[in-house]
Amino acid sequence: MEYTLPYGKTSITLNLSGSLIIDVVLPREEPGSRDPLMDVKKAIHSPIGMSLEDYNDARSVAIGINDKTRPVSHEVLLPPLLDYLKEKGIAPENIHLIIASGTHQPMKAEEFIKILPREFTVNYPISAHDCDNSPMTSLGITSRGTPVLVNQDFYNADLKITVGNIEPHHFMGYSGGAKTAAIGLTSRQTINKNHSHITHPNAITGHYDDNPMRQDVEEIGKMIGINFVVNAILNTKKEIIHVIAGDPEAVMAFSIPISRAINQVAVNGKYDLVIVAPGGYPKDINFYQSQKALTHAGMITKEGGDILLMAECIEGVGSPGYEKVMQSVASHAEVMVYFTKHEFEVGPHKAYLVARDGLTKKIHLHSSMPEAKVRQLLLDPVSDPQIFIESFLSNATPDCCIAILPCGTSTIPQIIP
């Protein structure tokens, strides 16, 4: 039988023959909106937990948007919002679009058209946040000890808005809401401290109320004073199925049950082999992003089992800091020792997340990266996934179980007790 998985902007089809138990684990299929622009307009005019009328006196607006590593439909979500602001008398030159880079490499001006309609780059001021160099405003320390330094241009605006998606996140619980600004528009110091909660048992996908990292984000968002968010929930085709706007926490409270119902998928147990794809471009733009799917695959892989990650990684590893750490270790066990001796840093934290699975599972990667680079990440490079499958099947026992996760980043597999 043939199974097709997204790979970059294309796909790869694998043939798995025989009488093995093979489960395809996918989010619930939902049709895309027939009129997503109208859905955005309705959401903006009927916000949850607040009213934009309270900000009628605003004369400057900052809108935090996601960078090229996120499949956000800016061409759909932004026009109704910008039209609304225009109707309120706010001039385009006073509406600043700020790309929420987090610790990612800030996008260059010539790259802005990858995520925004060309006319936006002409009519609105746009900048990419730099967690190391952008001017920051210091707002104090959260109850969990996170120093909050936020992009000065965003903080100084009369009306602070973020735009993004809500979906499962492998350690933040869920993306969306305040996260775009609380992580995407803050300093490296802020992000490092927040992400240092990564070892907490509740810092996992699907956890929100009891996730210390995510709740720290909510506190950061309140300190920043994010006024309004516009968030979308997407289907497996990256089409908009729901749009929710309003107060950041109210939007999360309303949206998480919807996302959970779509993305949480029951499985009967763990598998000998899990074949997983992040979901295609841009979710597999680099290994840094692709690793999110690896975490979800690891949740349902037997100890000693295999994971085959199908991720193009057209931009390579995606984190110089992560690469530097991997140059100094020779095993996943050494990675874990490294993290007991060094201060926590975002970027190198990917080494920890991979090692957490790599200690008990065999991780194989089919990508466009050179084999030497893949081995440096302590992964097994697979040049031909079909040959790998055939070799695996030739040694498989009759009771071997295989799972296929075509949209691994947005799939929460839940083992039925």
Image: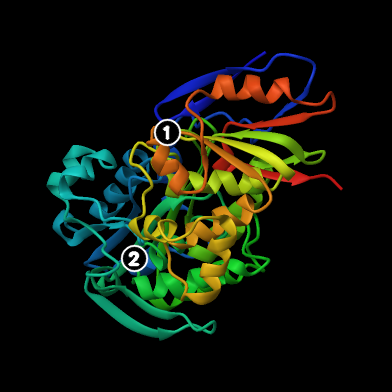
Q: Is residue 322 visible?
A: yes
- Residues 130 and 153: in front is 130
| CA separation in Å, label 1 and label 2 | 28 Å
Q: Is residue 217 visible?
A: no
**Which of pointers 1 and 2 indicates the residue nearer the eye?**
1
Image check: 321 left or right of 11? left
Three-letter residue code for mark 2: Leu
Q: What colour scheme has been applied to the protein in the rendered image? A: rainbow
Q: Quadrant of residue 369?
A: top left
Three-letter residue code for mark 1: Glu
Residue 132 place in picture, x, y as percent: 27, 69
Graded by Cα atoms within 10 Å as few (under 14), some (14 to 19) or many (20 or more), the crowding at tag 2 reads: many
**Where, quadrant-wise, is the N terminus in this rendering?**
top right
Residue shown at 44%/42% (left/top)? 374
Using the image, determine if residue 221 lies above or below residue 399: below
What's the mark number on residue 312? 1
Residue shown at 16%/44% (left/top)? 110
Residue 253 place in picture, x, y as percent: 61, 60
What's the mark number on residue 185? 2
Residue shown at 30%/43% (left/top)? 79
